């Protein structure tokens, strides 16, 4: 019996044009518990092949879940037909994809087998226990949830210009939520972690029991916290918030497809866009950090991932590329072409995006802040082509005369990313990739991670006005 | 049903029946299969140009089993008997170790009523030529690149046909065919150093005959709206009246409100209201909210839900009085009520609860009078068209960036503002702080419908 790789090679050998075939099998399992009841326990198996071709300067794509040679050949023909029909309309035709170091061989991220061997039943018992512990941490906790998701990804990517890579990895995440209630007031908190690796990787920083305690404590603390006054302020952003800023507000604006559409980063290569203290990167693997949520050895175009320094000492240094945008800009692809499922085309997506650590300790940064806020525990966010961003934060603590004082309820912070990064005057040596659970959305989801040091900057807090 | 979809229908039904049989043979007391078939052709746009053309089709099947009060679920994208058997066994295995929950249920569904929506499938869309799809895409691109200040980032024209099937071992068998032409644009305005926020719209029609004109009309309006945002200025901080246009009403207020109308939230007692609040005034008496799954021009139109329960229009809030919650069988069982046909999801997910097409009813004031009233009360005020931010569904607090927002001074629009944050609470905004509702409404992205609202006591933090 032929291997998947041979099947794909045989199919592509019938193409007179550049072509790429990507086999993707995903097994996913999800568990969800609320108030002691299992709300969801499910398993999903999805597999198939997506074929993309470049004909007369235009892309065509088609996919199938049937791996028979006949079906694969039919899918190739359909993709060619699609591309041919589009080439008559396309104005800027893609001449040729740039040569690059294409992946060959096996690319395995450890943890897959360990996670697969652990019975789902055992994971469910842990989830049930964590939810119960969160719920019973305080009499003020009205409801708790615990959600666990895992994805096992097996891929084979073959291109007519030489890629032939087989990869496998497992991604998992766990999320805890608590709702506290007192005298008609309610407050909600979340705690989450996402990794690429085994079950144990999830708990390398905090145990599940500690995460339960943290989620419950935060919800209870928020009950009595006042709403924050709105306005422009000095902020110390935690690594998780820095991760959001790096990903949402900078990362998206330097994705080359957005740049070509006119994002705020267009024509800014080589110019000062941030404080000289800021160096910002996007990478498939991060030195010294194991099991990051966005870990990736080879992208979905068969390109080996590399570290891309987007901002170097405050100067915009590089955009993020797939093979097409690299051809347009005349640079090497950066390994950012990613597809969610076999029936999705690869798009320019981030992996692990972070600001590099600095020299000061967090303690020193707080001690030298007269008035401001320490902002932590992100609630997600969005950013615009203008670099304007909006992030939610669950936990905001006032800093007065170099000391942390009272805690406020969650707030929204906003600003223009490059302007905010230009105000950075302190960068900590403490460093974490800490985006937690969740996915980046850009038509398709993508699992990413982000983080950095603590940074001090100035931005707008959206709170109440008197 | 035309011949091509007849083949897919037979294949889907045959696979679903096999899956059901595997599950029952493997030990399920009751089992339910949710299945779908879909095919689509898509022309994608990117970077001011045509980008990629694609064609796909595929099946998806999910099996839910009950063993006593234990539930298991598994799904796949194959009709191969070996894979169907594998997922049936997996669902049984999951049920075997999942703790019992008395509210899991699979029920025999009634037939869909005769007045429910019919003919969601337009036969003209099944065999539509690639040339016609290219012509429609040309119309969309034509409008998008007419004014060079508009930068097209992404867009598409997509034609799809689908089959949805729910059957269970108690005898439920519901099948519906659907088709649609959908199109979307995402882009921004650029003029000199001025760059607007990204804006996005999508729309669909179920009839091929309607597509051309609607593509041109919607794209033209969208581009004009984006380009108006190029007149950029600064806002000021204040607390007071803000006008929310329909998309902002839905983004900020109704999305959070729907959490509190979700029957599962009521069953779990994690929302603001309980069953005892029905027939009690809960919000401003000018406010009426319904859910209507029978509107054929809306994307959420369907004659049955994820569990096979027939759908029907439902009054949720009537003149401020709480009338009903959205229920699936799980919530209905927990609350000792009947399902309202609001089980949501597809073959690869367990049922959840979601409304189909929410409609916030029109008020009696012309939209102009909302602007006049705001101007009478305040020298300057904000008009919010879109929202990017957080809404805490539990507390009802929201805080985020007002996108595409207008700044008005002395009753005149001055310019559009960026980096302006708004915050408030949805229960207060739709309760004591709701000042006026426009008589004009708008359907957003072929789904939900809302009028424009004038709301007081909103905190605005200027950039």
Image (tube, coloured by chain):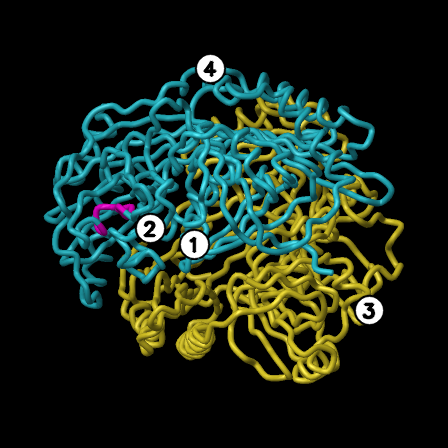
Range drawn in magenta: A317-325
* Residues at discs 3 and 1 in contact (Cβ within 8 Å): no
Chain hosting mark 3: B
Decide which of tag 1 and tag 2 comes sooner along the chain: 2
Find numbered disc 1 in the image and state the secondary structure of the residue it sits on. Answer: helix
Looking at the rendered structure, which numbered label has been put on residue A419? 1
The disc at residue A254 is 2
Closer-to-camera residue (B316/B151): B151
Residue B205, percent across and down? 48, 69
Magenta residue check for B193 = no
Mark 2 and mark 4 on one chain: yes
Q: Residues within 10 Å of mark 1 (few under 14, many from 20)?
A: some
Which of the 4 quarters of the picture holds residue A71?
A: top left
Q: Are dots 4 and 1 on a single chain?
A: yes
The numbered dot on residue B296 is none
Q: Nearer the viewer, residue B372 or A143?
A: B372
Whether pointer 4 and pointer 3 mark residues with C-beta atoms closer than 8 Å, the reply is: no
Which one is nearer the viewer's eye here, A156 or B433? Answer: B433
Mark on residue A117? Answer: 4
Residue matched to label 3: B319
As helix, strand or loop, the secondary structure at mark 4 comes to: helix
Write down the quadrant of residue B226 in the picture: bottom left
How far apart are the alpha carbons under marks 4 and 1? Answer: 48 Å
Up the image or down, A447 lies above or below B439; here it is above
Which quadrant is home to the C terminus of chain B?
Answer: bottom right
Chain for numbered disc 1: A
- Single out the mark in the foreground, 1 or 2: 1
Q: Give the mark, 2 or 4, whose residue is nearer the N terminus.
A: 4
Query: In this rendering, is residue B299 above or below A395?
Result: below
Q: Chain B is which colour?
A: yellow
| SS class, disc 2 | helix
């Amino acid at each position: 019996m032929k291997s998947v790789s041979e099947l794909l090679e045989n199919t592509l050998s019938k193409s007179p044009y550049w072509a790429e075939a990507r086999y993707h099998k995903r097994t996913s399992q999800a568990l969800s518990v609320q108030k002691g009841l299992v709300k969801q326990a499910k398993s999903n198996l999805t597999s198939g092949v997506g074929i993309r071709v470049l004909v007369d300067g235009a892309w065509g794509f088609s996919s199938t879940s049937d791996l028979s040679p006949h079906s694969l050949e039919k899918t190739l023909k359909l993709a060619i037909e699609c591309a041919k029909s589009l080439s008559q309309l396309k104005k800027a035709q893609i001449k040729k994809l740039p040569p690059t170091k294409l992946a060959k061989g096996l690319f395995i991220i450890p943890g897959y087998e360990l996670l697969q061997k652990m019975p789902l039943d055992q994971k469910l018992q842990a989830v049930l226990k964590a939810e119960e512990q969160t719920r019973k941490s305080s009499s003020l906790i009205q409801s708790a949830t615990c959600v666990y998701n895992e994805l096992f990804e097996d891929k084979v990517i073959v291109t007519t210009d030489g890629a032939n890579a087989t990869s496998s990895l497992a991604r998992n995440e766990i999320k805890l939520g608590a709702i506290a209630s007192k005298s008609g007031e309610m407050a909600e908190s979340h705690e989450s972690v996402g990794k690429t690796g085994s079950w144990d990787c999830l708990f390398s920083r905090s145990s599940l029991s500690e995460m339960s305690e943290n989620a419950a404590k935060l919800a209870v603390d928020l009950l009595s916290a006042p709403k924050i006054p709105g306005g422009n302020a000095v902020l110390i952003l935690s690594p998780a918030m820095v991760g959001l800023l790096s990903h949402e507000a900078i990362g998206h604006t330097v994705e080359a497809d957005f740049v070509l559409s006119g994002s705020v980063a267009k024509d800014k290569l080589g110019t000062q866009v941030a404080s000289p203290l800021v160096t910002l990167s996007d990478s498939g693997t991060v030195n010294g950090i194991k099991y990051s949520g966005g870990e990736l050895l080879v992208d979905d175009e068969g390109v080996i991932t590399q570290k891309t320094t987007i901002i170097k000492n405050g100067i915009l240094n590089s955009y993020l590329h797939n093979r097409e945008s690299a051809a347009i800009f005349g640079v090497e692809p950066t390994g950012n072409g990613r597809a969610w499922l076999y029936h999705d085309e690869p798009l320019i997506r981030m992996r692990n995006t972070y600001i590099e650590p600095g020299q000061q300790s967090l303690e020193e940064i707080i001690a030298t802040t007269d008035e401001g806020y320490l902002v932590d525990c992100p609630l997600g966010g969005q950013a615009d082509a203008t670099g304007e961003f909006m992030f939610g934060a669950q936990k905001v603590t006032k800093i007065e005369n170099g000391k942390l004082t009272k805690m406020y309820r969650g707030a929204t912070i906003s600003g223009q990313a490059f302007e905010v990064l230009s105000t950075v005057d302190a960068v900590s040596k403490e460093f974490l990739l800490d985006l937690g659970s969740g996915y980046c959305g850009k038509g398709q989801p993508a699992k990413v991670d982000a983080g950095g040091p603590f940074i001090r900057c100035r931005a707008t807090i959206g709170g109440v006005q008197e | 049903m035309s011949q091509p979809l007849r083949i897919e229908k037979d294949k889907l039904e045959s696979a679903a029946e096999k899956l059901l049989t595997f599950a029952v043979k493997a030990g399920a007391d009751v089992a339910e299969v949710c299945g779908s078939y879909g095919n689509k052709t898509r022309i994608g746009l990117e970077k001011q140009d045509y980008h990629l053309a694609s064609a796909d089709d595929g099946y998806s099947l999910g099996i839910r089993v009950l063993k006593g009060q234990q539930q298991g679920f598994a799904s796949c994208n194959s009709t191969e008997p070996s894979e169907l058997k594998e997922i049936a066994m997996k669902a049984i295995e999951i049920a075997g170790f999942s703790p019992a929950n008395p509210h899991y249920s699979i029920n025999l569904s009634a037939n869909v009523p005769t007045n429910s929506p019919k003919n969601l499938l337009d036969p003209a869309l099944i065999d539509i030529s690639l040339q016609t799809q290219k012509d429609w895409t040309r119309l969309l691109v034509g409008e998008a690149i007419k004014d060079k200040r508009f930068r097209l980032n992404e867009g598409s024209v997509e034609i799809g046909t689908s089959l949805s099937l729910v059957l269970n071992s108690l005898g439920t068998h519901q099948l519906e065919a659907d088709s649609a032409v959908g199109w979307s644009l995402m882009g921004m305005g650029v003029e000199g150093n001025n760059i607007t926020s990204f804006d996005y719209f999508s729309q669909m029609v179920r009839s091929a005959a309607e597509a051309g004109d609607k593509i041109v009309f919607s794209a033209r309006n969208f581009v004009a709206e984006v380009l108006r945002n190029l007149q950029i200025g600064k806002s000021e901080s204040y607390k007071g009246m803000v006008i929310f246009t329909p998309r902002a009403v839905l983004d900020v207020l109704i999305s959070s409100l729907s959490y509190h109308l979700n029957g599962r939230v009521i069953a779990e007692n994690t929302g603001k209201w309980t069953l005892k609040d029905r027939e009690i005034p809960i919000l401003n008496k000018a406010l009426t909210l319904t859910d209507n799954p029978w509107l054929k021009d809306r994307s959420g139109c369907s004659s049955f839900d994820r569990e096979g329960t027939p759908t029907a229009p439902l009054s949720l809030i009537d003149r401020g009085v709480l009338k009903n919650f959205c229920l699936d069988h799980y919530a209905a069982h927990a609350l000792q009520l009947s399902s309202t046909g609001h089980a949501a999801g597809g073959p690869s997910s367990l049922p959840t609860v979601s409304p189909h097409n929410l409609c916030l009813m029109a008020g009696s004031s012309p939209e102009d009078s909302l602007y006049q009233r705001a101007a009478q009360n305040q020298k300057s005020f904000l008009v919010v068209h879109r929202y990017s931010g957080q809404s805490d569904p539990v507390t009802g607090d929201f805080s985020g960036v007002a996108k595409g927002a207008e700044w008005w001074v002395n009753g005149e629009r001055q310019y559009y503002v960026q980096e302006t944050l708004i915050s408030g609470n949805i229960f207060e905004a739709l309760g004591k702080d709701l000042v006026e509702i426009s008589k004009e409404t708008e359907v957003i992205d072929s789904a939900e419908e809302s009028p424009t609202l004038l709301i007081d006591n909103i905190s605005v933090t200027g950039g």
